[in-house]
Image (cartoon, grey):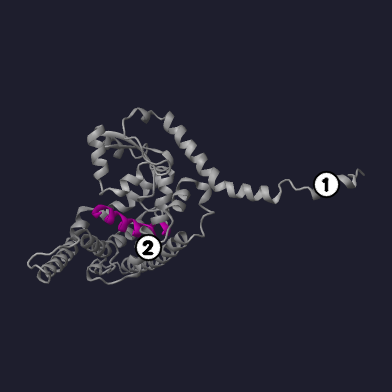
Amino acid sequence: MFKLPLGILEMAFSVPFFSPVTLVGLLVSIPIVLPLLRLAESMIRASLSPSRIVPGPSGGSLFLGHLGLIQESTKGEWQEEMLKEHGHVLRYRALLGTARLLTTDIKALNHVLTNSTIYQRPETIRYALGQLIGEGLIYAEGSDHKRQRRIMNPAFSPGHIKEMTEIFLAKSRELRDILLSKTLTSEAPPSARVDMLHYLHQATLDIIGLAGFNYSFNALSDQQSDLSDSFNAVIHPSSSVPVIQILKVQVPAFRNVLVFDKGSRDVQKARSKMDSIGRELVSKKKAEVLREKMTGDDSVKKSKDLLSLLIRSNMDEAGGGLTDDEVLHQIPTFLLAGMLLVG
């Protein structure tokens, strides 16, 4: 039997491949090297991309590109100025030097929107959306998006939307009364200075809650709700560190590593709370729809909110319906879509 000399065995166990100092150095360098590699990749892609010939603004930071300037300006102001300067199609830089195209050309926009299988969201954007609202309609792409949209379409038929008109009118009247009271109690009646965007957000939240899943946020009455608090904590995290969030979005290797910062923990806690409330809503709606189907009585009043209509349509689907998680994730999707339309 062949035996290794004792001296070789001692060397194998006594001489490490990496000294402790070297190992620590490697671990410390990873958070620096990976973003630099990602930046280098973005710069190479940008230099080889056909979009490099498109005119656009210079400057911007190495890390944020022009996003810092966009964030600092009034919403849409920076884009409007750049379009005036460079024309209706321009190129600017986003995170880690990635190139973005901005166009107001109607034909180009129509082409992109009608060819969603070609023009899909980047993986980084989908990851960020998934962290915020789950894998709902806004997140889905390709065949998943077609499947979800097919099942959801009946809920958005003109007839069903018309039945929700009274909700819109009731909340509009409530908003009118609140604004009127502000003018009567102001320092210079009958006029008052109010933050209209704030009140429009509150009215929108109330409308989405009632029309979307028959949930009363009572935001116009300044009442708190666990669902709205959780949603706001996810969309507008107060304690998150932007650098950490950006690294997790742009560098996939960090996503399962950078999870112990306070921002990540707060968002995860809020998401868990939001999902818990959402599961209760979905479970309640499924039970209601099942009772409707078991009675078979058309005279029984059926729930008309979007979530009930979606669950009813999903139950009628012969195959390839939505999973429970996909149904659940439509709730924050409804909320985000409404907030984006307002803000």
Label 2 sits on what residue type? Ala
Q: Main secondary structure of the magenta part?
A: helix
Closest to the observer, 257 or 296: 257
Label 2 Cα neighbours within 10 Å, binned few <14 / some 14-19 / many ≥20: many
Task: Work out whether mark 1 precedes mark 2 in sequence or the reverse, and give the earlier one.
Answer: 1
Quarter of image, res 3: top right
Amino acid type at circle 1 is Met
Does residue 191 appear to the left or right of 28 in the view shown?
Answer: left
The residue pinned by badge 2 equals 233
> Is 181 positioned to the left or the right of 343 in the image?
left
Distance of label 1 from label 2 (alpha carbons): 56 Å
Residue bearing the label numbered 1? 11
User: How far from the left and from the top, in percent, is residue 205?
Assistant: 26, 62
Q: Is residue 251 magenta?
A: no
Residue at left 39%, top 64%?
274
Disc on res. 258: none
Q: Quadrant of residue 294?
A: bottom left
User: Is residue 137 in sight in this rendering?
Assistant: yes
Residue with the most extreme right position: 1
Pair 1/2: label in front: 1
SS class of the residue under badge 1? helix
Q: Position of residue 269 (x, y in %)?
A: 44, 65
Range covered by the magenta-colored residues: 324-343
Front one among 172 and 324? 172
How many numbered tags mark residues here?
Answer: 2
Question: At x 53% / y 43%, what residue is drawn?
Answer: 34
The x, y position of residue 339, in whole percent, is 28, 56
Q: Nearer the viewer, residue 140 or 92?
A: 92
Q: Is residue 320 visible?
A: no
The spot of residue 44 in percent (x, y) is 46, 32
* Rendered position, 71 above or below 212: above
